[in-house]
Image (cartoon, helix red, strand yellow):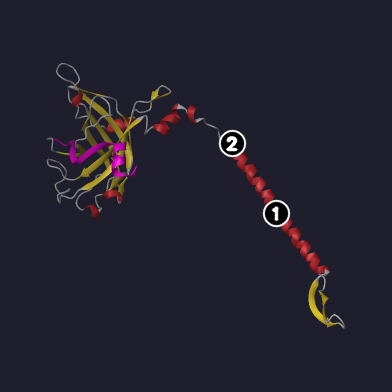
Amino acid sequence: MIGRDILCYSEGFTTGVLPCRITTVKNAPTHSELSQNANHEERVESRILDLEMEARQMLAKAKAIRESIPIVDPLEKTDETNLRWNKHESSAVGYRLYIDIGREEGTWMDPKWGSSGRRIEGSMDVYFQLPCLVEGVDVSLADENVMGKMIQDNLAKRSSSTAVRKLDCSKARLRKGFDEMTCHGGGYRIDVGNSSTNQRRISSSTVRFFIEVDGTGEKDSSYGDIFIPKGPLYFSLPCFGEGINQLSRKDGIISVRQVGWHTGWRRMESRIVGVFRAIPIQDAKNKDGYSSF
């Protein structure tokens, strides 16, 4: 029975005041109320069944997607996959180039370029690709487009050159990271000098490479009267032996190729636009405190 209890007292002849309990009865639910409650419970139960069905369908789709993905054993990657994953670890040698662009003594750049003495400093990470065979093909070799941009007129008569190989490059980090310059990679070769006895002198080897850049734009007033020209930036630096593993830590030259008359006739000529220094990539990361840009 639904209701509430009320406690009251009655007088007795011999026992005094005796408590008694009166129960009031509340009206029972109507048929309409019972029907509404039943309908609500049915809707809740139906919704739960719908959610369970959706969950089962989603699990089935996830299982199908998971089963459609091929299982690759990381210890059995193809040569091509290994090259892609490890090209900056085992198939390339990395350096961080610290560039200092500005007017240098003896440059053939336009007299107005950098006449104020202002300079653009920055850094970029480069990776010199090492010989790497994939199905019998050396994938480190540069294509004809890259080979065509290498400078040829600085080859001495008594020197020999290695093959032109690919070079990867990150964006250039300018103004301590507050600005950047897009780079598109390039190519490199090593020129090995020969002595009069036809014996190669280790100290005479030079690495020559270029990096294709978007430049900073001539109309960017924030740099004043100096800018980095769009196109290939050319670098040269002494190296030890015929490999890329030991580059000199001394300053090297950065130049661009432009048409001029300084050689006595109109032709493409090299014009110095700055200097740079190459530091092994891991040493540079430890020194600078950042991985890449």
Which quarter of the picture shows residue 138?
top left
Picture layout, residue 183 above or below residue 128: below
- Toward the front, the furthest residue is 14
Q: Position of residue 185 (x, y in %)?
A: 32, 37
Which quarter of the picture shows residue 133?
top left
Which quarter of the picture shows residue 130?
top left
Give how far apart the Cα atoms at labels 2 and 1 are.
30 Å
Residue 256 seen in render: no
Circle 2: residue type: Ser
Position of the C terminus, as image quadrant, is: top left
Residue 41 seen in render: yes
Q: Mark 2 or 1, which is nearer the eye?
A: 1
Q: Is residue 275 left or right of residue 84?
A: left
Residue visible at 25% across and 27% down in the picture? 190
Residue visible at 36% across and 29% down in the picture? 91
Q: Which residue is mark 2?
A: 68
Label placed on residue 210 = none
Which structural element holds mark 2?
A: helix
Which structural element holds mark 1?
A: helix
Front one among 92 and 183: 92
Q: Which residue is mark 1?
A: 48
Find the magenta span and give its range: 265-293
Q: Is residue 72 left or right of residue 113?
A: right
- Badge 2: few (under 14), some or many (20 or more) residues near its Cα, within 10 Å? few
* Residue 118 painted magenta: no
Q: Earlier in the sequence, mark 2 or mark 1?
A: 1
- Badge 1: few (under 14), some or many (20 or more) residues near its Cα, within 10 Å? few
Q: Position of residue 134 (x, y in %)?
A: 42, 25
Position of the N terminus, as image quadrant, is: bottom right
Front one among 257 and 87: 87
